Every structure is written in C-alpha cells, then in structure tokens.
Amino acid sequence: DVIFRTEGITKVYDTGEVKVYALDGVDLELYKGELTVLLGPSGSGKSTLLNILGGLDHATDGRVWFGDTELTDMPDRGLTRYRRDHVGFVFQFYNLVPSLTARENVQLVTDVSPDPMPAEEALELVGLGKRMDHFPSEMSGGEQQRVAIARAIAKRPKILLCDEPTGALDSTTGVQVLEVLRDINERFGTTTVVITHNAEIQRMAHRVIFFQDGKINEVKVNKNRIAPS
Ligand code: ADP
Ligand code: ADP
C-alpha cells in the first residue's frame, strides 16, 4: 500500500538574489510499513522533503498525499493535527528537557496522546529499561537519542521521520540507534523514513532513495535486507 505519494514536488527558496531549488519536481511513492532511507550529498533536498512529508513545511509547487488525504494546501491547524496524530519526529539533536528524567521526557508526550503506550514500555523498547530515572546529562549521546526515539514512538505514530538521527554519534553508536529504528519498524510496522550518512542502514532498509540537486537520482529496492534476528 502506498502511504505517501508526491507529484512534481518543488520547493524554491527565494533569497532575493538567487532562487534555490531545494526540490525540483520530485515524484515519489513510499509504502506502508517500509523503512526507507534518503541518501545524497548535503544540500540535495533530503530534509526539505522530510519536512514536507511531516507537515512541517509546504511545497512551492506539486502535490503530496498521506494515504487519501492531501496535505498540499492543508492549513496549519490541519497540519498540526496531522503531525500530532500520525507523525513521530527524531532529529540530529535530541531536544530533551534537561531538568526531566528519561521517563518524564517521554511522559511529556504520553500525557497528551489519545492512545499512548506507557513511557516505561517505550523506554524498554529502545533498551533503556534500566535508565528511566536518569537525567539527560547522565546519559551518553546514543542513550539520549534513544530517549528521543522512545518519545517519538510512545504515541504509536503511523509514521516515524528521522533527520540525521546518527549525525552527532560515532559510527558504532549510530549503528545501534539505527538498529533500534529497524526493530521498531519490524515490530510495529511503523512506516519509517531516515536521513543518514551511515552506510550500515542500507543493509537494513527496504528502499533506498538517492538524491542529487533536488531530484531523485535512483531508487534501490533492497531484496537482501537484514531483518532483526
Ligand atoms: P539536505 O537535507 O539534503 O542536506 P536540504 O533539504 O537541507 O538538503 O537543503 C536543500 C537546499 O535548500 C540547500 O541548497 C539548502 O541550502 C537550501 N535551503 C534549505 N533550507 C533553506 C532556507 N530556509 N532558506 C534558504 N535555503 C534553504
Ligand atoms: P504542536 O502544536 O503539536 O506542539 P509543533 O509545531 O510544536 O506542534 O510540532 C509538532 C511536532 O513536530 C512535535 O512533535 C515537535 O516535537 C516536532 N517538531 C517540529 N519542529 C521541530 C524542531 N525544529 N525540533 C524538534 N521537534 C520539532
């Protein structure tokens, strides 16, 4: 099943002197339950696309659908509801509240979601069952990112959008974080889109989309995907 579809998505930044085509006519289908990776050089449009899929930004031109719902011209209130009900975000920097424990950080989301899993369950899922009462300053970067993932999945989102979740981590820790994302995708069937430079994820992904200059260069379907053991 197609969960996201875009038709001719273009995003232009007009800085006054020059027009930057962050996206230049992107046609794309993403499939329900898949883990898709966006690869490509810095500035090739990956984050711009992720933000449009996540309802954080509008395209300049073209159309985008989430299932049967068209996001293209949805007013901000609708997009806010869409994000709240369906999308979990993970960014390069963890954005945890420093004065709250891991559990309390996740509870910020579970307290306001209609059908959350318990914060403890989300933290167990990312392997932090023994760290729930630690503060961010007492955790490594990889652990903090896993708290951020627990926070993102606690509301049971249909979609998980991750923009360079490994960007601030060394490669070994980065792989552990990617494995957590893959396990969640496998376990809940959460449609997951990840931007990362960590080559390891190509082995775990269902689909790899290569960007260049705001366009899709190549789409690879991974038949030899390594599923969790
Ligand atoms: P990637 O995620 O692949 O690194 P981005 O989507 O962040 O690429 O950026 C694509 C292009 O759009 C780049 O040339 C970037 O400089 C430009 N861009 C992104 N955001 C803005 C903005 N807010 N204002 C102007 N240009 C932007
Ligand atoms: P809401 O009204 O639901 O708070 P927001 O505009 O604050 O809507 O954002 C919706 C979701 O997007 C939230 O989960 C928020 O954490 C996430 N989000 C948006 N932009 C950012 C950002 N720059 N950094 C971290 N999270 C962000």
Image (cartoon, rainbow, N blue to C red):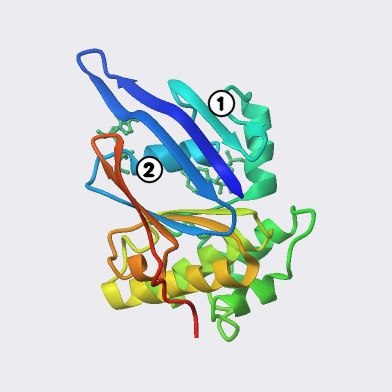
For label 2, the crowd category at 10 Å Cα-Cα, with few meaning under 14, some 14 to 19 and many 20 or more, is some
Which residue lies at the image location 65% right of the left edge and 55% below the top edge? 157
Relative image position of residue 45 (x, y in whole percent):
32, 38
- Tag 1: residue type? Thr
Name the secondary structure under disc 1: loop
Q: Is residue 182 left or right of residue 215?
A: right
For label 1, the crowd category at 10 Å Cα-Cα, with few meaning under 14, some 14 to 19 and many 20 or more, is many
Looking at the rendered image, the disc whose residue lies closer to the viewer, 1 or 2, is 1
Relative image position of residue 107 (x, y in whole percent):
68, 63
Q: Is residue 135 above or below residue 44?
A: below
The answer to which of marks 1 and 2 sits earlier in the sequence is: 2
Q: In terms of image quarters, where does ligand 2 lie?
A: top right
Q: Is residue 130 above or below residue 164?
A: below
Which residue lies at the image location 45% right of the left edge and 62% below the top edge? 206
Q: In this view, does 124 lie to the left or right of 173?
A: right
The residue carrying mark 1 is: 72
Which residue lies at the image location 38% right of the left edge and 25% below the top edge? 10
Which residue lies at the image location 50% right of the left edge and 86% below the top edge? 229
The residue carrying mark 2 is: 47
- Tag 2: residue type? Ser
Relative image position of residue 113 (x, y in whole percent):
74, 54
Q: Can residue 136 be seen in this view?
A: no
Q: Can residue 47 be seen in this view?
A: yes
Mark 2 CB in 8 Å range of ligand 1? Answer: yes
